[in-house]
Image (cartoon, rainbow, N blue to C red):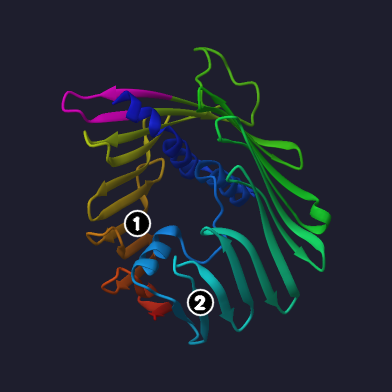
Amino acid sequence: MKNQFLSLSAYCILFTQLFAQSGPHSHEQMYLNYISHNQAINDVDFNAKTMAKMAAAGVRDVHKRRTNCHGKTYETHFVLNAAGRPLERHSTKKNISYTYLDDTLLNGIRNDANGEYISRSMYSDGHLCNWETRRNDRITYRLLIQYNQAGKVSFSMIQRGWKLRKSFTLENDYSENKLTRQRFMYNERLIQEWDYSCAPEGEELDSKRLAEICKTLEENADGSYVEHVRKMESGKVVLFKYYYSAEDQLTKAEKYHADGSLISRTEYSEDGSVFEEFSPKGKLLECIIIRKDVFGNILLKQIEKGKKKTEEKYVYNASQLLLSKEERVNGKRILLEEYSYN
């Protein structure tokens, strides 16, 4: 069980950061974290699960029709290869073509009103090391990734903006292949630092940009267990609890202030989840209910925050491919997406 607990560490680190992360560069921070944990980029319109479904169903063409709240419609056409990966993407505003090697994305060429953009990737020993986008032979975006001897991402950097003057980096330290520390920087200035190896008891954090995350495991007689996470950030303590079944399924996640008052709670079941966020006085601020089918596809998503009530409905075909997504706010439809497959 403890070995299983250690294997879940990366997931819990990412989940903990999702709970509490905010700031002007949080998007870049989370994208670099995604790269660190998945060792891959997602630069196409479909995720791996959807592409696998389309490949199994023999889909080669996808038509997407999107209607906004004003009734304006946008259409996009995709041409796929046998693995369900997009080869071409055509819409009114832009056209993109992709090339692959053994289902690994190599290049992308985008044409829109601003001209032609060419993206290229470089690999070493099967690992993505460089992804660049150029326009008129000038680099407009660059992603660099470095790995340690164990093949884990030790350094990643995004460069963008005029003459690539904006840079975002994430450095990862490991001990016996276990992540122990992370540093996120913007233009070589430290923005946030995470320490996953508990500091000695009584030691205070000197840096306001350091987040200390400590974990302990509580095992129950029936095989279920609870992971306790203590996070100290800018001198403030936040506590997390993750509840797992004996089959290692996450059943509940809770976040607390240092005084024990509940901040948020998520309960998981086979058919969905319920998320609740509370004020310091215990008042319910937001509730998100998600319902899924037996295949794990989202059927319904309901969000209630104050007077705003949002509802999303999803419909799938026999191959579990999305046919439509409808979104309403306080009863008024604001978005309709429709898909057809050939």
Q: Amino acid at mark 2?
A: Phe
> Which residue is more in the foreground, 301 or 11?
11
On residue 334, the disc is none
Q: Mark 2, residues whose alpha carbon is within 10 Å: few (<14), some, or many (≥20)? A: many
Tally of numbered tags? 2
**Residue 88 in view in this figure:** yes
Q: On the image, which quarter does residue 217 sit in? A: top left
Left or right: 144 in relation to 100: right
Residue 182 picture location, percent across and down: 59, 32
Q: Are marks 1 and 2 in contact (CB under 8 Å)?
A: no
Magenta segment, which residues?
215-227
Q: Amino acid at mark 1?
A: Ile
Quadrant occupied by the C terminus = bottom left
Distance Cα–Cα, label 1 vs label 2: 32 Å
In the displayed structure, would residue 155 be above or below residue 214? below
In the displayed structure, would residue 128 be above or below residue 102? above
> Which residue is more in the foreground, 16 or 208?
16
Q: Residue at x 56, y 75 (%)?
A: 88
Quadrant occupied by the N terminus = top left
Residue 135 picture location, percent across and down: 78, 67
In the displayed structure, would residue 147 be above or below residue 95? above
In the displayed structure, would residue 13 be above or below residue 331? above
Secondary structure mostly seen in magenta is: strand
On residue 288, the disc is 1
| Residue at image mark 2 | 78
As helix, strand or loop, the secondary structure at mark 1 comes to strand
Left or right: 242 in relation to 144: left
Q: Residue at x 39, y 34 (%)?
A: 8
